[in-house]
């Protein structure tokens, strides 16, 4: 077994689709394979590469929970977020690690062409847990999505104008997968 890559984090590069066959917990971006969630790399005899969730499900995060998270990284097909708290349990501490992923298919109903039109770096999002083990989140639903965002150019705060966002300082217009609660805070 050459499954000695050890533990990986969401977005870690694993190898190429020429070397491995896509298994669970792995996603493919133009032939490069990355970890979808945290866990141990497993490579089968048939070269199927998968990630086995290592971390016990944090006891405070369950399927169906709504969480507040901050976007840490945006790839072509997944946004990687850092979960800050579970709605309704804001005072409860979340066990580490608290990284979750929003796959492009879980952003909203309908086809999403470009994930970077839906989320921005450091956005605060409200999302529902669809898989507590892998910490997969969904922002499908009117109240879910981005609740706070900053301008990619000047870091000014973005104010909602209809379905788009406009920067206070530089008038830049940006788009997001907006929650109905955008600008209302995370309560
Ligand atoms: Zn700006």
Image (tube, rainbow, N blue to C red):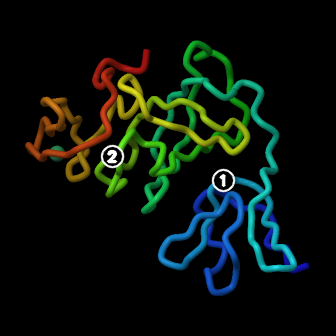
Q: In this view, does 72 lie above or below 26?
A: above
Q: Where the N terminus falls, by quadrant?
A: bottom right
Specify whether 143 is left or right of 22. left
Q: In this view, does 112 lie above or below 4?
A: above
Residue ID at (18%, 30%): 159
Specify whether 28 is left or right of 53. left
Mark number for residue 126? none
Residue ID at (48%, 43%): 106
Label 1 neighbour load within 10 Å: few <14, some 14-19, many 20+: many
Distance between mark 1 and mark 2 Cα atoms: 20 Å
Circle 1 residue? 37
Q: What element carries label 1?
A: loop
Residue toward you, 46 or 167: 46
Q: Answer yes or no: disc 2 within 8 Å of ligand 1.
A: no
- Residue 27 image point, x, y percent: 59, 64
Circle 2 residue? 118
Indicate which quadrant contains ligand 1: top left
């Amino acid at each position: 077994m050459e499954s000695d890559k050890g533990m990986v984090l969401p977005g870690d590069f694993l190898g190429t689709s020429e070397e491995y066959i896509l298994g669970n917990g792995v996603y493919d971006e133009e032939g490069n394979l990355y970890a979808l969630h945290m866990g141990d790399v497993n490579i089968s005899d048939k070269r199927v590469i998968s990630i086995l969730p290592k971390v016990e499900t944090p006891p405070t995060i369950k399927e169906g929970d709504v969480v507040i998270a901050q976007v840490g990284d945006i790839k072509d097909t997944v946004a990687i977020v850092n979960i800050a708290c579970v709605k309704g349990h804001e005072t409860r501490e979340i066990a580490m690690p608290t990284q979750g992923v929003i796959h492009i298919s879980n952003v909203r109903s309908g086809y999403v062409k470009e994930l970077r039109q839906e989320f921005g770096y450091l956005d605060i999002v409200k999302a529902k847990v669809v898989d507590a083990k892998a910490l997969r989140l969904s922002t499908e639903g009117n109240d879910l999505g981005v609740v706070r965002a900053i301008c990619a150019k000047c870091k000014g705060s973005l104010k909602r104008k209809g379905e788009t966002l406009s920067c206070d300082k530089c008038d830049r217009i940006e788009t997001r997968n907006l929650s109905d609660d955008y600008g209302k805070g995370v309560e």
